[in-house]
Amino acid sequence: MSFINFLKKLKIYIQKIPRLFRVFIILFIFPLIVKFVVLPAFSGQPITITVLINALEAAQWQPLVEEFQQQHPNIRLQIIEGPNATDQVEDLYTSSFLLGNSPYDLVYMDIIWTPKFAAAGWLLDLSDRLSSEELDQFLQGDVRGGMYQEKLYRIPFRSDAGMLYYRQDLLEQAGYDPPETFAELIRISQDLQQQNLADWGYVWQGRQYEGLAAMFVEILRGSGAFWINPKTLEVGLDLPEAINGVDFLVSTITKGISPPGVTTYGEDETRRLFQSGRAVFLRNWPYVFALASDSPVAGKFNIKPMVHAPGESSGACQGGWGLGIASTSQHPEEAWQVIQFLSSEETQRKYTLITGYVPSRRSLFNDPEIVAKYSHYPQLLEVIENSALRPPIAQYAQASDILQRYLSAALTQRMSSEQAMKAAAEETRRLLSVNSQQSSVSRF
Ligand code: GLC
């Protein structure tokens, strides 16, 4: 058909459309087609989706970004590198949203940020984006951590749970089973240190930062105490069991089981010490498994759920990272395409195989390719499914700051465990009562 014939036919079709509808198309539909289809196509400019992530993961995301770009040439995924500590990344997102001109379309979120960011109105509600069958494919704790007031704001990407690493070779050599209780961990450590099998018994995150709060949630659970009940806002930090938990940590320092510098260590300092072969036990996240498997302790260590008080059970702190869409984003549909790509089973499998980070999709824990590389994955699922959330409340950042401050005072022995926990509990109660009074007047 010639071009002239095509135009003639088009004219006949257009004449068949009722006049009123023609006016509607010209006034409303046509400008939209021009704006969203014609202009972007002719400008050749892909839409840029920006996200801020910690520097370590920014590098690890590179292969994923490249693959996404190949599949979506019309979207440019721009990664802004942030600091590695979760609190500092949170501060950067918070100030960008408070200033009202956030450059970020996507929010790569630690599990603990959801209530605050959602309550402040900084995130889009994603509840209708996934069916309940689709959501069921993710680990429950990760989904719960993405919800606020029954709505979903964050789609899980990678999960995390705290656990105990131990030197299987040294324990076997000295004739010990892995410890179950706090007291057993102390006893085994002291014995192995006396036998000069290791310099240190136990290394853990004692610096005043979010990692301290995450580690302490496990001590609280294992001691039979709790931090804040999110439903009643009851505070359990001054329970005798919680004080016993702090005493356990302090005793690891005073008994010489943990190095004095432990009160300045984060995840990576403790990982390096364990990897160098100088410590028997380590509390850390699953990412250590892959890194330590390529270190002097390769093949010599194993993992297990955290130790606890007699009669209590282990708790693994639920960590993890997911993606939300900033409510100020001009391109929520393109941002959603990035989330779909990153949270897919295929991308998570690749990311886990490359980095050793834990996926948030249940099926991957028994995936043949993953299990062939990380034989501990089925075991890991058990640890992760028994995890404890840090209190999912909008005032989490302030509550965590209070706990970190007083815990640090107790660990560095500037206050007794009892004084510190009583003061932390009182200040937390004041925070929650002020906030609950305020929230009955206005919700943010
Ligand atoms: C890990 C966890 C995160 C936690 C942080 C503390 O990144 O995934 O949830 O807040 O460690 O350092």
Image: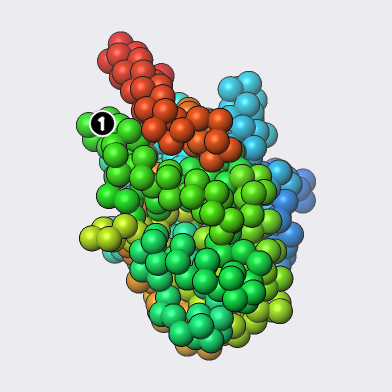
Placement of the N terminus among the 4 image quadrants: bottom right
Q: Name the residue at 31% across, 57% down.
A: 309
19 or 78, which lies in front? Answer: 78
Q: Name the residue at 47% across, 70% down.
A: 188
Q: Name the residue at 73% across, 47% down.
A: 81
Judged left or right of residue 290, residue 404 is left
Q: Which residue is mark 1?
A: 234
224 or 417, which lies in front? Answer: 417
In x, y percent, where is residue 369?
53, 86
In x, y percent, where is residue 120?
45, 26
Q: Name the residue at 59% across, 69% down.
A: 193
Judged left or right of residue 99, residue 129 is left
In x, y percent, where is residue 430?
36, 18
Q: How many marks?
A: 1
Above or below for 200 versus 427: below
At label 1, the amino acid type is: Glu
The quarter of the picture where residue 421 lies is top left
The quarter of the picture where residue 200 lies is bottom right
Colouring style: rainbow
Above or below for 222 versus 83: below
Above or below for 79 versus 139: above
Q: Is residue 298 visible?
A: yes
Circle 1 residues within 10 Å: few <14, some 14–19, many ≥20: some
In x, y percent, where is residue 25?
49, 37
Q: Is residue 408 visible?
A: no
411 or 320, which lies in front? Answer: 411
